[in-house]
Image: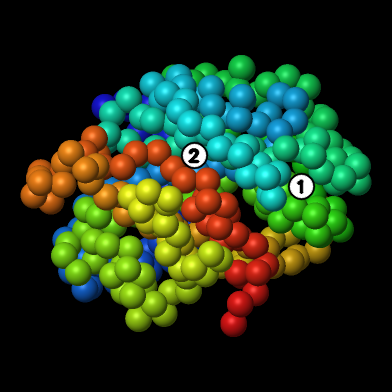
Amino acid sequence: MNKTLDIVLKGLMARYQERVPDVSAIINVMLKEGAIENAADIENDHIAFRTLGVPNLGIQSLEKIFLHYGYRRMDHYFFPSKKLDAYWYAPASPAYPRIFISELRVKDLSDKAQQIIHSYTDSITVDPVDSLKLNDGHAVDQFLHSGLWKLPTLSDYLALAEESEYAAWVIYNRYYLNHFTVSVHNLEDGYNTIGEFNNFLERNNFKLNDAGGKTKISADGMLLQSATIAEMVPAEFADGINHLIPGSYVEFAERKPLKEFTHLPSVALTRRHRREGFEANNADKIFESTYASQTGRE
């Protein structure tokens, strides 16, 4: 086990859980219904970060933290309509979650949007991770929850949101954890498929992202995902104005066994026996858990 990584992940999850009430609410209902025996039974499939593709920031900067802890950069994904690139990272040990880092292709935005973003990020003239003590878990935890640039004004936030809701989310939230993911295939019978788990969530009044359908299915049918809708949270902007903005959300993933392992009993299946990686079409729709088309639904 990596004690430094443990500190970083514990800090990320603690702040995320404070800000996303659905996390504790879902866990409590899972315990009540017997989907799990205790919260530690939940396997975290992956966590996700959003970044801006500008000098000294973005994927090339943030990934250094996790590469230092033994993660390996894996597949690249491109999301043309949302102007995003992304990579996923495999941990050195299956005890840890996968990591998914996306990046806004800032140069693909309008001149106005680029100017707004650079008015905040141009103050960062060197990669901040280069001076970070990566073996100090508490320092890394603090960094991931610090403002790398000044707080935006509401007018700048709204102007960005008109063109890229992703850009607006990042300009306010920075590296705040975007979501964590429950591995539903490891839950008790009756809860261990996405279909069953979605039914469980909806009968307990949790709202699901329905972009592309409530269940997002990979082309090979082996990766099924769903997500809650981000709750609107109060945010104070640089000009002192308070405004509700989308926070973070919770994702759920079912990874089916690879064909050569379908003969194994479920209790014998481990991470290496199941479908790995991600699916661009699934992720494209899950990004919308923080978009107005979802958060504005009745």
* Residue 279 to residue 196: above or below: above
* Residue 93 to residue 98: above or below: above
Which label is found at residue 39? none
User: Residue under circle 1?
Assistant: 151
Residue 230 in sight here? no
Please tell me in which quadrant of the rendered image residue 226 appears.
bottom left
Residue, x 48% and y 31% (percent of image)?
Answer: 75
- The N terminus: image quadrant: top left
Position of 193 compared to 164: left or right? left
Using a 10 Å C-alpha cutoff, classify the residue at mark 1 as few (fewer than 14 neighbours), some (14 to 19) or many (20 or more).
Answer: some
Q: Nearer the viewer, mark 1 or mark 2?
A: 2
- The C terminus: image quadrant: bottom right
Position of 29 compared to 158: left or right? left
Name the amino acid, label 1.
Answer: Leu
Using a 10 Å C-alpha cutoff, classify the residue at mark 2 as few (fewer than 14 neighbours), some (14 to 19) or many (20 or more).
Answer: many
Tag 2 secondary structure: strand
Name the residue nearer the viewer: 184 or 83.
Answer: 83
Residue, x 16% and y 41% (percent of image)?
Answer: 261
User: Residue under circle 2?
Assistant: 100
- Count up the numbered dots: 2
Mark 1 to mark 2: distance in Å? 25 Å
Q: Going from the N terminus, do you reach mark 1 or mark 2 first?
A: 2
Please tell me in which quadrant of the rendered image residue 23 appears.
bottom left
Name the amino acid, label 2.
Answer: Phe
Tag 1 secondary structure: loop
Position of 150 compared to 25: left or right? right
Please tell me in which quadrant of the rendered image residue 150 appears.
top right
**Position of residue 73 measured from the top left corner of the image (x, y, whole percent):** 47, 25
Colour pattern: rainbow
